Amino acid sequence: MTTTIAHEWRKARKAHRCIWCGEQIESGERYYHWRGIFEGDPQSNDWHKECNAATEAWDLRDGFEPYCHKRGSQEER
């Protein structure tokens, strides 16, 4: 079960790693930040703008394998 605590769009002050594609989110780039509880554990994840858009048709409550999708796509690597 997934519980969202907070989510927002941010502008990166430092580099982050996108949970969807595994590529770096560069400093100065806008990204989506999510914080919550997944399977009983607290988590904090970041997505590129286009990777977040790719998740819209994906049921994230069922989970997904981190870092295994192509950037901005539902296609797996």
Image (tube, grey):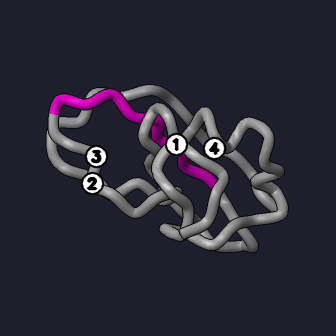
Q: Which residue is mark 3?
A: 25
Q: The N terminus lies in which quarter of the figure?
A: bottom right
Q: Earlier in the sequence, mark 1 or mark 3?
A: 3
Are the two marked residues, 2 and 3, in contact with CB atoms closer than 8 angstroms? yes
* Membership of 34 in magenta stretch: yes
Q: Check disc 1 and give the amino acid type.
A: Gly
* Membership of 51 in magenta stretch: no
Q: Check disc 3 and give the amino acid type.
A: Ile
User: Is disc 2 placed on a helix, strand or loop?
Assistant: strand
Alpha-carbon distance for marks 2 and 4? 24 Å
Residue at 76% in and 53% down: 60
Q: Which residue is mark 4?
A: 5
Relative vertical location of residue 15 with respect to residue 22 in this rendering, above or below: above
> For the residues carrying marks 4 and 3, which lies nearer the camera in this image?
3
**Depth check: 34 or 70 in front?**
70
User: Is disc 4 placed on a helix, strand or loop?
Assistant: strand
Q: Which residue is mark 2?
A: 24
Are the two marked residues, 1 and 3, in contact with CB atoms closer than 8 angstroms? no
Are the two marked residues, 2 and 1, in contact with CB atoms closer than 8 angstroms? no
**How far across and down, in percent of the image, does residue 12 sit?**
24, 36
Alpha-carbon distance for marks 2 and 3? 4 Å
Residue at 20% in and 42% down: 26
Q: Check disc 4 and give the amino acid type.
A: Ile
Bounds of the magenta segment = 28-36
Q: Earlier in the sequence, mark 1 or mark 4?
A: 4
Q: Earlier in the sequence, mark 4 or mark 3?
A: 4
Q: Check disc 2 and give the amino acid type.
A: Gln
Alpha-carbon distance for marks 2 and 1? 13 Å
> Can you tell which mark lies on residue 72?
1
